[in-house]
Image (spheres, rainbow, N blue to C red):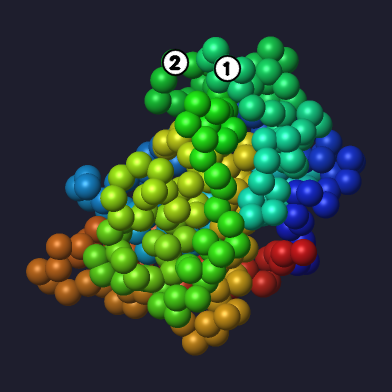
């Protein structure tokens, strides 16, 4: 049966409570930390050697679609009424808007050490200890809006620059691809610093704390953010119905990216699934 993913700002009090409780139970069981480990393992930059599947690569979108489905299925084994909500950061743009409320994700971190002090994922409640990360910090950290060097979330017009591109991806299939929907949405822009953080990437930087880097899964907002990114891929597909995932075939011998990116019908680790098999989610879920 096809289920529905909703805008997080439309969830009822009961839906928010059930979503939070399912996350806390998955964390208690130790399953949540496996998702953190997986994301860290596959967070490979295009300046490093080897295959890239999760970031800086064409498979950014199908890889995260499958990653979200795995977490969603895990939550639904706890409570079958739960689905992943999405956070539309072009509409809910302030540090006090949904989802940054006490009965959902809580708010920003305190100024001294960025520790989140409110909401169900605050360390002081003892139910959300950071056990897998790139530092030894045990508490969840955020810096919504970057208080010392303010940063604005992307707007609808920023997304439009990505959505209107009719080509899925282009060579060199990484962070320097100037054309193609995938990189314009993923958000690796030219230059360095805030001006180069676009769309998806800018949101990670705006949240700050654990959302910056491979251990970003430690913040539950990761799933709401990527559910919206997944929805944007669906919108792009509807706008460009004849466009498909690229590259269509493995790259030619001699191409510097051969063996480093996944083609349409190649398997995406850690799963036995291809980007082509993940292009259509309509038989599993829809977006409200």
Q: Which residue is outermost to the bottom?
A: 242
Q: Residue at x 74, y 25 (%)?
A: 119
Mark 2 to mark 1: distance in Å?
A: 19 Å
Q: For residue 282, what is the image quadrant?
A: bottom right
Tell me the residue that label 1 is attached to.
111
Tell me the residue that label 2 is attached to.
136
First in sequence: mark 2 or mark 1?
A: 1
Residue 87 point in image, percent of width and height: 67, 50
Residue 43 point in image, percent of width and height: 37, 43
Q: Residue at x 40, y 43 (%)?
A: 194
Q: Residue at x 57, y 35 (%)?
A: 145
Judge depth for marks 2 and 1 and give the one in front: 1
Residue 118: tell me if it is visible: yes
Neighbour tally class for label 1: few under 14, some 14-19, many 20 plus, Cα within 10 Å: few
Q: Residue at x 69, y 28 (%)?
A: 107
Residue 288 point in image, percent of width and height: 77, 64
Q: Circles 2 and 1: CB distance less than 8 Å?
A: no
Q: Which residue is outermost to the left?
A: 254
In this view, 48 is above or below 285: above
What kind of element bears circle 2? loop
In this view, 203 is above or below 167: above
Q: Which mark is residue 130?
A: none
Q: Quadrant of the N terminus?
A: bottom right
Q: Tell me if 257 is positioned left or right of 284 in this view.
A: left
In this view, 117 is above or below 211: above
Q: Tell me if 13 is positioned left or right of 273 in this view.
A: right
Residue closest to the eye, 49 or 210:
210
Residue closest to the eye, 121 or 260:
121
Residue 179 point in image, percent of width and height: 34, 70
In this view, 138 is above or below 200: above
Q: Which residue is outermost to the front?
A: 149
Neighbour tally class for label 2: few under 14, some 14-19, many 20 plus, Cα within 10 Å: few
């Amino acid at each position: 049966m096809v289920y529905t993913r909703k805008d997080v700002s439309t969830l009822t009090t009961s839906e928010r409570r059930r979503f939070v409780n399912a996350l806390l139970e998955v964390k208690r069981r130790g399953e949540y930390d496996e998702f953190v480990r997986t994301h860290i393992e596959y967070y490979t930059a295009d300046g490093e050697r080897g295959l890239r599947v999760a970031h800086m690569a064409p498979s950014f979108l199908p890889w995260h679609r499958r990653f979200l489905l795995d977490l969603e299925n895990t939550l639904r084994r706890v409570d079958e009424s739960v689905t992943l909500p999405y956070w539309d950061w072009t509409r809910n743009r302030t540090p006090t808007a949904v989802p940054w409320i006490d009965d959902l994700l809580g708010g920003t971190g305190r100024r001294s050490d960025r520790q989140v002090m409110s909401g169900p994922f605050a360390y002081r409640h003892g139910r959300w200890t950071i056990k897998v990360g790139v530092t030894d910090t045990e508490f969840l950290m955020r810096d919504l809006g970057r208080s010392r060097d303010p940063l604005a979330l992307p707007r609808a017009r920023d997304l439009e620059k990505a959505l209107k591109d009719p080509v899925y991806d282009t060579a060199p299939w990484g962070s320097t691809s100037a054309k193609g929907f995938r990189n314009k949405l993923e958000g690796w822009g030219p230059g360095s610093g805030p001006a180069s953080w676009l769309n998806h990437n800018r949101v990670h930087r705006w949240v700050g704390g654990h959302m910056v880097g491979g251990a970003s899964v430690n913040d539950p907002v990761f799933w709401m953010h990527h559910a919206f990114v997944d929805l944007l891929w669906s919108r792009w597909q509807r706008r460009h119905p004849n466009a498909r995932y690229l590259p269509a075939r493995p790259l030619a011998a001699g191409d510097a990216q051969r063996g480093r990116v996944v083609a349409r019908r190649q398997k995406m680790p850690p799963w036995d699934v291809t980007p082509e098999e993940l292009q259509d989610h309509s038989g599993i879920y829809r977006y409200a």
